[in-house]
Image (tube, grey):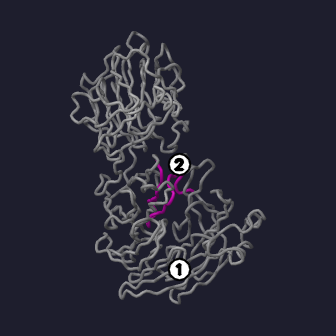
């Protein structure tokens, strides 16, 4: 029993050992110091029992006080501890949360009695519950939001599993999966109305909830009421009791770790290939099992005529050696078009098209690039590590954030932005940091002795029509993500008429030929804890005020489609750790749909694998790096038959 107590304190919960004076006649408890084999937890009439063993008791509450619970209750109701039980006497609606987050696989169990003894709320109805609940806006802390009141509709935006047992005045029992958008679809097989699925008043019922792999079950008195196989299972979150206009007691609440038996995939794939109901389809483009990736979120991997595609294929590990691949747009007929070169984990070799017959790629940590003639297979070396090429004017952009190992002390050069003459193979330095300071409105910060020698140029990008380009100057506090200055500067196609545009946010890019977009993060933003604490803003280059495109936007690397009505972005560790997603926003409404969800790359604790969704030239496809198989590969979302369906909020 010492082990259980130690485990309980590790989780911050008061774990109560087995007490022979308590009422345990309804279940046989075989608690061992090792594993607890499943004896009576599987119902005899289950057609497909879940294969598991019982492990350690994670949480156990004997209801000595409310320290493990948070009540969200409408006026007129009470939630108290009476005689060692949780007693809920509710008038207008309440949710009673267990404070501690759970991770699958687990068994949640408790005993309940619905009281019907003449009291004002003694209605024997709505034995409801949530499990694996997360708030998409605050995935790590469901109690961060102040919007929930106990009124049922204030929970529609959560992502969770729900059972309403004996709802609608004890006439219906239902299971739903909330998707976090306000939608909670009801399948016909999950809508029960027969008497045996309703609540018997004044009788103790034992409820068990199981999450294991891609399945979740809800049992009453050992009988499986709902058994749901989920293509994208919810595997972490909070549990809550939910009821309305009802009087009930809860006892013997316990959560036990489940140990899957052989054959159970506890981390099933989350991304399905093929057609989706919404009208789009997902396909793998790179071939085989080697790690592969496209270049970046605003570098289209399609050739200008949209018939072929380019990507980088690693030999084994990322970063590492590999080759640039060109294939047909559907991924067929792939062929290597480069020598064996080193690629980076962020953008491969930044491979991109110069025209239909020529491809350009850079060399990791080197100051030169290679142009490949796809017709005669010849190659040509040019000065500068390519940042972005313009297919319209045939010029390239680069900057010289030199590797510190190469340039130290007196050899270190000031940060410069350069125009690449790809025909001649040389570069033209346009501006260095010292020359920029004179035109910068925040030069007092940049020139402060505290920041001497800091600040760099980054991310030069051509406008869609190739008539101009911008780049970023960034000064941040060393060792942090705090940006003191982050500015966009502009020049024409020949590098003339250089000027300051504005301060910008994260991952800036062109929205049109006349404006940039970026994520502006507000105070309190956090990639995991508060991912909606930011807005996608439009920054006109003519000096007009910036304005929001999407408020409270999720995502990290985002871009607009050619028509400007859809915005695609990626997000990491959301809403569960180790899960990435590609989201598509409807700009007019600000609503989003989750197109694909995937598991993070194996052992990628720092999330170096970025999906970097990028639009096709006609806006009918989205290419992205996916990692659901454990290694990154290149995929395509075909939107040919897709139309953004409005959110049907329940």
Q: In terms of depth relative to the viewer, which is nearer, 405 or 266?
A: 405
Question: Which residue does the image show at 38% across and 63% down from the upper left?
Answer: 633
Q: Secondary structure at mark 1?
A: strand
Q: Residue at x 35, y 61 (%)?
A: 637
Q: Report whether residue 344 is seen.
A: yes
Residue 108 place in picture, x, y as percent: 39, 30
Viewport quadrant of the N terminus = top left
**Residue 586, quarter of picture:** bottom left
Q: Which residue is mark 2?
A: 528
> What residue span does the magenta drawing correspond to?
548-574
| Count of marks overlaid on the render | 2
In the rendered image of this protein, does residue 400 appear above or below residue 319?
Answer: below
> Where residue 320 sits in the image (x, y, percent)?
45, 69
Q: CA distance from mark 1 to mark 2?
A: 36 Å
**Residue 441 image offset from top left, x and y in percent:** 73, 67
Instruction: Pick whichever, 329 or 585, lies toward us.
Output: 329
Label 1 crowd (10 A; few <14 / some 14-19 / many >=20): many
Q: Residue at x 33, y 66 (%)?
A: 285
Q: Quadrant of residue 628?
A: bottom left
The residue identified by callout 1 is 396
């Amino acid at each position: 029993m010492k082990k259980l107590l130690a485990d309980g304190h590790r989780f911050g919960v008061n774990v109560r050992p087995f007490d022979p004076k308590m009422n345990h006649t309804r279940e046989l408890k075989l608690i061992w110091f090792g594993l607890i084999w499943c004896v009576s937890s599987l119902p005899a009439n289950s057609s497909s029992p879940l294969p598991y063993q019982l492990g350690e008791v994670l949480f156990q509450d004997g209801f000595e006080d409310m320290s493990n619970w948070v009540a969200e209750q409408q006026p007129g109701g009470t939630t108290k501890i009476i005689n060692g039980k949780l007693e809920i006497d509710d008038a207008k609606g309440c949710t009673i949360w267990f404070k501690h987050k759970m991770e699958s696989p687990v068994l949640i169990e408790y005993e309940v009695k619905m009281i019907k003894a003449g009291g004002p709320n003694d209605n024997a109805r709505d034995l409801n519950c949530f499990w694996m609940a997360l708030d998409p806006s605050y995935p790590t802390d469901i109690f961060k939001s102040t919007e929930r009141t106990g009124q049922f509709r204030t929970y529609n935006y959560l992502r969770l599993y729900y059972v309403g047992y004996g709802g609608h005045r004890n006439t219906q029992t239902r299971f739903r999966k909330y998707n976090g958008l306000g939608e909670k679809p009801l399948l016909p097989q999950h809508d029960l109305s027969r008497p045996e699925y309703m609540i018997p008043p004044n009788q103790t019922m034992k409820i068990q909830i199981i999450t294991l792999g891609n399945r979740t079950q809800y049992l009453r008195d050992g009988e499986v009421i709902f058994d749901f196989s989920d293509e994208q299972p919810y595997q972490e979150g909070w549990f809550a009791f939910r009821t309305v206009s009802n009087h009930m007691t809860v006892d013997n609440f316990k959560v036990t770790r489940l140990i899957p038996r052989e054959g159970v995939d506890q981390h099933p794939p989350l991304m399905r290939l093929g057609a989706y109901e919404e009208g789009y389809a997902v396909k793998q483009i790179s071939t085989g099992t080697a790690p592969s990736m496209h270049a970046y979120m605003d570098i289209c991997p399609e050739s200008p005529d949209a018939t072929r595609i380019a990507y980088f294929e690693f030999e084994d590990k990322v970063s590492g050696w590999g080759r640039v691949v060109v294939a047909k747009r559907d991924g067929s007929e792939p062929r290597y078009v480069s020598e064996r070169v080193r690629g980076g984990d962020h953008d491969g070799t930044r491979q991109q098209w110069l025209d239909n017959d020529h491809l350009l790629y850079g060399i990791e940590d080197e100051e030169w690039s290679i142009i490949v003639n796809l017709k005669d297979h010849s190659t040509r070396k040019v000065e500068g590590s390519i940042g972005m090429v313009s297919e319209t004017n045939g010029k390239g952009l680069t900057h010289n954030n030199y590797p510190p190992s190469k340039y130290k002390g007196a050899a270190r050069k000031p940060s410069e932005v350069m125009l690449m003459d790809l025909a001649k193979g040389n570069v033209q330095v346009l501006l260095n940091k010292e020359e920029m300071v004179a035109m910068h409105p925040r030069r007092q910060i940049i020139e402060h002795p505290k920041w001497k020698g800091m600040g760099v140029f980054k991310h030069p990008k051509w406008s869609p029509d190739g008539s101009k380009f911008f780049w970023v100057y960034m000064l941040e506090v060393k060792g942090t993500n705090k940006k003191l200055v982050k500015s966009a500067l502009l020049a024409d196609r020949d590098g003339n008429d250089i000027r300051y545009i504005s301060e910008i946010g994260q991952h800036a890019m062109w929205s049109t030929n006349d404006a940039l977009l970026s994520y502006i993060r507000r105070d309190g933003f956090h990639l995991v804890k508060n991912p909606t604490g930011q807005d996608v803003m439009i920054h006109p280059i003519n000096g007009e005020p910036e304005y929001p495109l999407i408020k409270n936007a999720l995502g990290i690397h985002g871009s607009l489609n050619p028509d400007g009505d859809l915005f695609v972005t990626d997000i990491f560790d959301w809403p569960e750790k180790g899960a990435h997603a590609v989201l598509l926003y409807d700009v007019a409404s600000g609503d989003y749909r989750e197109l694909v969800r995937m598991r993070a790359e194996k052992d990628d604790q720092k999330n170096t694998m970025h999906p970097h969704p990028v639009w096709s030239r006609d806006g009918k496809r989205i290419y992205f790096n996916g990692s659901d198989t454990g290694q990154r590969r290149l995929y395509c979302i075909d939107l040919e038959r897709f139309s953004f369906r409005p959110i049907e909020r329940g």
